[in-house]
Image (spheres, rainbow, N blue to C red):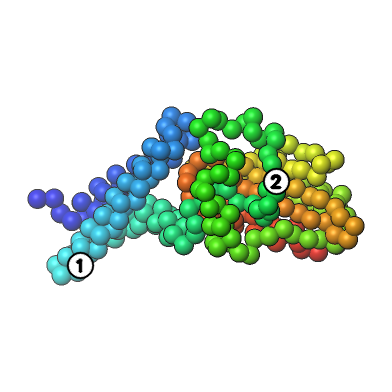
Amino acid sequence: MISAEKISIRLALLAGLLAVSAVAAYRLEWIGFQIAVPGLAIAALSGLLAALSGVIALFGAMRQRKSAMPALTGMLLGLVVALPVLLSVLAGSGVPRIHDISTDLDHPPDFNVIRSLRAATDNPLDRKSPDNLDQLQREGYPELKSLMLNRSPEVVFEQALKLVESRGWHVVGVSTANGIIEATAITPIMAFKDDVIIRIQGTEQVTRVDMRSVSRVGISDLGVNAKRIGRFLADLKQPTN
């Protein structure tokens, strides 16, 4: 009979292998999003089972007064694999299941250059799905709105472009005349691509900044796009020297 310690360690190693394989295969474009995400889910479940087996083995080791190191190893390895996935799911559980976020819902910034870079299988940019997209965004992210700055459009444009570059986003389109910056943000682990457009318009009194961030794959972005916009505009709002 296989001991709980061995079950825990074997499950943890299996979970790690599944997670690494899913990430690597997706980044190398060997598999699609529809396979990579379930693969991560299975890895997380295996990690949880490994952690649970480790806990059981730990109590057994304490009763038998033997080394708890194997049990702790399996438990910790399982948690290392499972926690990132679980925390991401928990973080996105309280946000609307949408993936296209804009500070201007009446006239969202419209992508130009990025359209030619997106595949036919990527999420559409027409903001028609779901039917109540605007309502869901208003309810989920009521704080997101256009940013008004008492600076010239030229200064704001330069600052915005520097912020985009400092974040490591891939700039694909810049139009100073139209006040448009288009870029693609790539997530660090799974290399998911989210397309971003920033629109800068000057009025007589202030400069208005609008921003839109759209995930190429997935129904829900787990709140990533709204966070990206919020943090970017907060940094842009900071006074300059």
Quadrant of the snapshot with the C terminus: bottom right
Percent x, y of residue 90: 43, 60
Residue placed at 49% from the left, 59% from the top?
95
The first of marks 1 and 2 along the sequence is 1
Residue placed at 55% from the left, 52% from the top?
133
64 over 46 or under it: above or below = below
| Residue nearer the viewer, 195 or 235 | 195
212 horizontally vs 54: left or right: right
Residue found farthest to the left: 1
70 horizontally vs 146: left or right: left
Q: Is residue 183 visible?
A: yes
Residue placed at 68% from the left, 60% from the top?
145
Percent x, y of residue 96: 49, 57
Mark 1 = which residue? 59
59 over 36 or under it: above or below = below
Residue placed at 56% from the left, 57% from the top?
135
85 horizontally vs 11: left or right: right
Residue found farthest to the front: 131
Q: Which mark is residue 109?
A: 2
Percent x, y of residue 72: 29, 60
Element under label 1? helix
Report how far apart the C-alphas of labels 1 and 2 lie in the structure.
58 Å
How many residues crowd around disc 1 within 10 Å: few (fewer than 14), some, or many (20 or more)? Answer: few
Element under label 2? loop
- Going by the numbered disc 2, the residue's amino acid type is Pro
Whether the residues at callouts 1 and 2 have beta carbons within 8 Å, the answer is no
| Residue nearer the viewer, 151 or 186 | 151
Q: Is residue 24 visible?
A: no
- Going by the numbered disc 1, the residue's amino acid type is Phe
Percent x, y of residue 229: 65, 55
